[in-house]
Image (cartoon, helix red, strand yellow):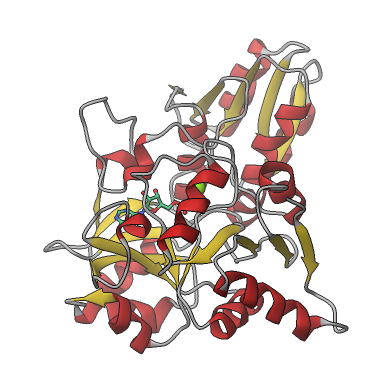
Amino acid sequence: METLLLTIPQTEGYDSQLDRAAELIRSGQLVALPTETVYGLGADALDPEAVASIYQAKGRPSDNPLIIHVPNDRSWLDRYCRQVPELAYELAEAFWPGPLTMILKRDPIVPDRTTGGLDTVGIRCPDHPVTLEIIRRADRPIAAPSANTSGRPSCTRAAEVLEDVGGRIAAVVDGGDCRVGVESTIIDLTGPTPCLLRPGGMPLELLEALCGPIQRDPATLRQMSGSEQPRAPGMKYRHYAPKAPVTVVTGAAEKTADYIARQGGPTTGVICFEEFAGHFPTSQVAVLGPLHDMTQQARNVFSVLRSFDERQVDQIYAQCPESTGLGLAVANRLKKAAGFHVIELEGER
Ligand code: AMP
Ligand code: MG
């Protein structure tokens, strides 16, 4: 299949490109879409066959459910979810459109294929004008997991989507580089208290300011053992991993830099803060961003992980931000890429 590249930030032909993407979705095809978090691989969430082809194109395990993307309109929450708590409307009001996914009881209209057989559904309104307009024109909720091949780092640029699933999907809508760079924060609202299933682009502190303390699913903190079931099925899989094994080193940045420099060699990859870029002269360096600029780190983390697949490295060491604000999501993605292989050094950052 030849994958169409629909380039959007242009005035000429803008409208017809949006119509074309919406029409492809309505006819059961796969279209990769830009969002503020990462590129999503979109299909009509109500069409089980279209949804099945998402799993096929990504090589995604079929028990790993999909998030549905809807307009910023509470009537869409009511259409696809049941027993919606008042808190869900409040969170949507405060944080949509934005990188917040809520897990709610599903309405039976949402097919099993979309929810991986669960009686809940993940729902969010993405903060990207192009994709919001495509959803509106398709007049369907769009199921869209991250557009990478399963297990690889997510895609934050259209070219990365083509690299991963080009030839297997009908089109990629190029909306430029993703502004946030990590996937949405997932909060489960089906239990007695809200629970964090995946840290992401919406800082936990902002959510807690509105809903009070949020529990954390253990899968957000450590590797799950074979017998454990995380509440977000996707969290049990190895993820975001480049081909070479990754080790995350936590602690004061000067100390982690020194530690990593001692491991270095020509086939060692190093993910480091900008301030330490000159610290590893014998290794292959990729810069995450300035030490205290977690917004920049979030934007870069996946392309940095991907960059090592084009280089000759047999091991990768990574400095790691503090787990506050967006740093919680950046640290989580690095640790997952490392299979939670983390070396903890003493000392404050
Ligand atoms: P991705 O689309 O690649 O960002 O992955 C979506 C994530 O959302 C995966 O980790 C899924 O397991 C999780 N997810 C989607 N729907 C649900 C649900 N109904 N319950 C729990 N987790 C979900
Ligand atoms: Mg994913």
In this view, the residue in front, 143 or 260, is 143
In the displayed structure, would residue 177 be above or below residue 142? above
Q: Position of residue 254 (x, y in %)?
A: 61, 29
Image quadrant of residue 269? top right
> Does 249 sit left or right of 273 as displayed?
left
Q: Residue at x 84, y 82 (%)?
A: 13
Q: Residue at x 65, y 35 (%)?
A: 305
Number of marks drawn: 0
> Does 107 sit left or right of 297 as displayed?
left
In the displayed structure, would residue 197 be above or below residue 221? below
Q: Residue at x 72, y 54 (%)?
A: 157
In this view, the residue in front, 54 or 308, is 54
In this view, the residue in front, 266 or 230, is 230
In the displayed structure, would residue 148 be above or below residue 85? above
Q: Is residue 90 visible?
A: no
Q: Position of residue 278 (x, y in %)?
A: 79, 29
Q: Position of residue 328 (x, y in %)?
A: 44, 48
In the displayed structure, would residue 340 be above or below residue 324? above
Q: Residue at x 56, y 80 (%)?
A: 138
Q: Position of residue 160 (x, y in %)?
A: 72, 47
Image quadrant of residue 316? top right
Q: Is residue 343 visible?
A: yes
Q: Residue furthest right?
A: 12
